[in-house]
Amino acid sequence: MIPLSQAIALGLLQGVTELFPISSLGHSILLPGLFHWDIDERAGDFLSFLVATHFATALVLFLIYRKDWTRIITGLVASVSNPGAARSNLDARLGWLLIAGTVPAGLVGLLFEKQVRLVFLSPRSAALFLALNGVLLFLAEWLRRTAKTGGDVADADRRIATELGWSQAIRVGVMQILALIPGFSRTGATLAGGLLVGLTHEDALRFSFLLATPIIGAAALLKVPKLLASGNGDAIVFALTGGVAAAVAAYASVKFLTRYFKTKTLVPFGIYCIALGATGLAFIGR
């Protein structure tokens, strides 16, 4: 069983690292190895704990962007009943772009997530892929296309819907597949994909957060009933504790990152990932 202090620490860590481009699962595996915490990453209690923290993060994202999601869902419903209207309804278009971007990682995750994580679920593997995540962030900044201006579109959601094409949304979604490997960041991968197809840092982050909400939330919702049905009161308490801590950290992370990426780049996060990954490889035994 995870001690309460570690549950809070890991919950706060997850809430930050899930939304920062530095891999939440990589940190959840690597840091206990570095600090010699007695945690079995394959144990049911730990997996239940991760489910709760992921669900809390997705819930915070949904609540922060609830007005956006109301518009998007309304637009999607309207486009189903009147397909011709979808061409002029930017909320509907954004909704379909999000669906297009969610499908690749969603399908691959359903088919292969368990197998991939069982193979790479070790501190040394997490350290290696965390360093490679840092390399990815550097490459994205180096190779990124010049961002479009979005004309006079002031609203970020409508700006994304105007600038992003279907193939580009799918390419960003394909980048999310990397996040199935512990050490690669979902936010980092989608930010990199957004930059490579021509979005600004700010718009790439927003598209990343919108993409993350259904895919993280759906993955967690599939597993929450198993946690509640287990009847393991201690596991539920520790999972809820971690979830609350993750929610607090996720809220603070969204507020910070939306300000940060108005003017800043991925470079500091790339340096951090390479440094932490190298530290893990140097100090964690085989």
Image (cartoon, helix red, strand yellow):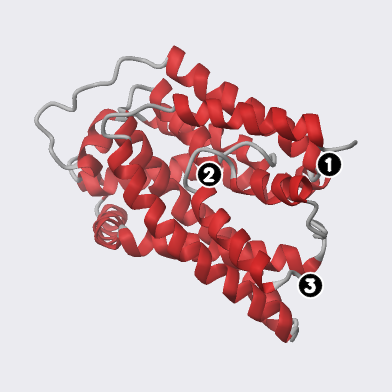
Q: Nearer the viewer, mark 1 or mark 3?
A: 3
Q: Nearer the viewer, mark 3 or mark 2?
A: 3
Q: CA distance from mark 1 to mark 2?
A: 23 Å
**Relative height, residue 225 to residue 178 (above, below):** below
Q: CA distance from mark 1 to mark 3?
A: 23 Å
Instruction: Please state the horizontal and vertical placement of residue 155, each as a whole percent of the image.
Output: 17, 42
Q: Is residue 89 left or right of residue 77?
A: left
Residue type at the position of mark 2: Val
Which label is found at residue 1? 3
Q: Which residue is mark 1?
A: 119
* Disc 3 element: loop
Residue type at the position of mark 1: Val
* Disc 2 element: helix
Q: Which residue is mark 2?
A: 103
The quadrant in which residue 120 appears is: top right
Q: Nearer the viewer, mark 1 or mark 2?
A: 1
